[in-house]
């Protein structure tokens, strides 16, 4: 339940658009019981839980999957009692985690978190709940201290996550408040809709949201690969396109040749044609240094093998796709050598290739690629 800001302490901060500050915990079940329906099929098994008239979740185990899918639906959140509510999805295990959990940094590196602690300064705990929530773009996990077990949860959108009890993970999935938090918005966080698209409609109800969590329990040595792979599937699902038969048999322009395969630890982020007739190629290394065994090692990619023998010129661009400045002119800050990730590209074996490029762990790189026959107005990088 959201704080309304009318407590005795000063200044009496309320929950709102900018502030998360709960003052009580409640169960979304209106009766104390959960309606449950089990469906067992040859392709998928489902457990449908209805916690209340405004909160439900469907758990799915697909055949051949090593993780579980949970599709949740929340809303409209009731506020008739005058209180706001901030709904979390809580997942509990028997793992012994001692207050440590990990959250992702913009879908990339996993950052260790400790309950009621900060890495570089002593935390004076004023908000034991809100002060332990961290932003999550893609994933969070907990790891057992004694036995080889790791439990992870993946999200399909940005949320907040924490682990307030050993073996637990919880995610903020919906909020609706009744009081302004006095941080400049001037109104409560109370988004409503009428579903009739009439701006003057007097009937307004809170929003209903639906999302998906992916849950997995793995050995720590296998968990990173399983989690990263499932994360890619969740964030970049296949796009199904339908057309009449024969409509794609004679494309108006030739398709971009794709002759090779990427290493298993490299992801294709972007491949598109630019206004200059070249190709914009952007690749990302999926793993951190040392993560998932050899998958956390530098990866060698031959652009010529990917796009065929027609590659005539390659030039590296900045991450955003603009020409790079002289790297010697860039300001460099002092850093400590903490791991082999600091190895230079020259130290990585990538021989016997025509257009070799190296991606270090977690690195994203962008290139402009010219194919034979295009206007040659860039110089080959090699």
Image: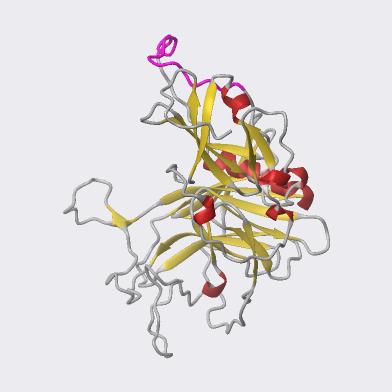
Which quadrant would residue 189 be assigned to in this image?
bottom left
| x and y, in percent, of residue 36 in the image | 58, 48
Comparing 22 with 150, the one in front is 150
Q: Quadrant of the C terminus?
A: top right
Q: How many marks?
A: 0
Which quadrant would residue 61 be assigned to in this image?
top right
| x and y, in percent, of residue 324 in the image | 47, 46
- Residue 24 seen in the figure: yes
Query: In the picture shown, does residue 191 fall above or below 156?
Result: below
Q: Which region is colored magenta?
A: 244-259
Horizontal relation, residue 289 to residue 84: left or right: right
Horizontal relation, residue 280 to residue 264: left or right: left
Q: Residue drawn at (42%, 9%), measured in percent from left and top?
A: 246
Q: Residue drawn at (43%, 67%), measured in percent from left and top?
A: 85
Residue 30 on the magenta span: no
Comparing 296 with 70, the one in front is 296
Query: In the picture shown, does residue 310 fall above or below 143?
Result: above
| x and y, in percent, of residue 176 in the image | 39, 64
| x and y, in percent, of residue 147 in the image | 83, 59
- Assign the magenta stretch its main secondary structure: loop
Query: In the picture shown, does residue 161 fall above or below 357?
Result: below
Comparing 204 with 351, the one in front is 351
Residue 245 on the magenta span: yes
């Amino acid at each position: 339940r959201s704080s309304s800001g009318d407590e005795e302490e000063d200044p009496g901060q309320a929950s709102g658009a900018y502030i998360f500050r709960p003052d009580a915990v409640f169960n979304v079940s209106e009766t104390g019981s959960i309606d449950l329906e089990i469906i067992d099929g040859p392709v998928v098994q489902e457990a449908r839980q209805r916690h209340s008239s405004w909160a439900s979740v469907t758990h799915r185990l697909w055949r051949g999957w090593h993780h579980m899918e949970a599709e949740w639906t929340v809303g409209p959140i009731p506020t008739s009692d005058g209180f706001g509510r901030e709904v979390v999805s809580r997942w509990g295990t028997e793992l012994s985690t001692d207050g440590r959990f990990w959250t992702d940094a913009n879908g990339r590196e996993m950052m260790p978190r400790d309950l009621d602690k900060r890495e570089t300064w002593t935390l004076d705990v004023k908000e034991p709940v809100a002060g332990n929530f961290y932003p999550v773009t893609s994933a969070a996990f907990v790891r057992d201290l004694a036995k080889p077990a790791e439990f992870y949860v993946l999200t399909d959108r940005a949320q907040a996550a924490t682990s307030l009890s050993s073996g637990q993970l919880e995610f903020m999935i919906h909020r609706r408040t009744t009081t302004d938090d006095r941080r400049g918005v001037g109104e409560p966080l109370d988004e409503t809709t009428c579903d009739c698209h009439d701006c003057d409609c007097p009937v307004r109800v809170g929003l209903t949201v639906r999302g998906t969590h992916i849950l997995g329990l793995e050995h720590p040595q296998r968990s990173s690969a399983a989690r990263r792979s499932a994360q890619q599937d969740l964030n970049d699902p296949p796009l199904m396109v339908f057309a009449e038969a024969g409509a794609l048999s004679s494309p108006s322009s030739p398709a971009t040749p794709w002759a090779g395969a990427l290493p298993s630890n490299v992801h294709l982020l972007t491949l598109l044609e630019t206004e200059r007739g070249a190709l914009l190629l952007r690749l990302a290394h999926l793993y951190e240094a040392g993560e998932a065994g050899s998958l956390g090692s530098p990866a060698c990619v031959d652009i010529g093998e990917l796009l065929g023998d027609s590659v005539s010129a390659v030039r590296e661009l900045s991450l955003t796709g603009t020409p790079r400045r002289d790297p010697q002119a860039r300001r460099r800050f002092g850093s400590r050598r903490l791991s082999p990730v600091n190895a230079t590209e020259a130290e990585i074996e990538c021989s016997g290739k025509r257009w070799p490029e190296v991606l270090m762990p977690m690195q994203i790189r962008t290139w402009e690629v010219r194919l034979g026959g295009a206007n040659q107005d860039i110089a080959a990088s090699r």
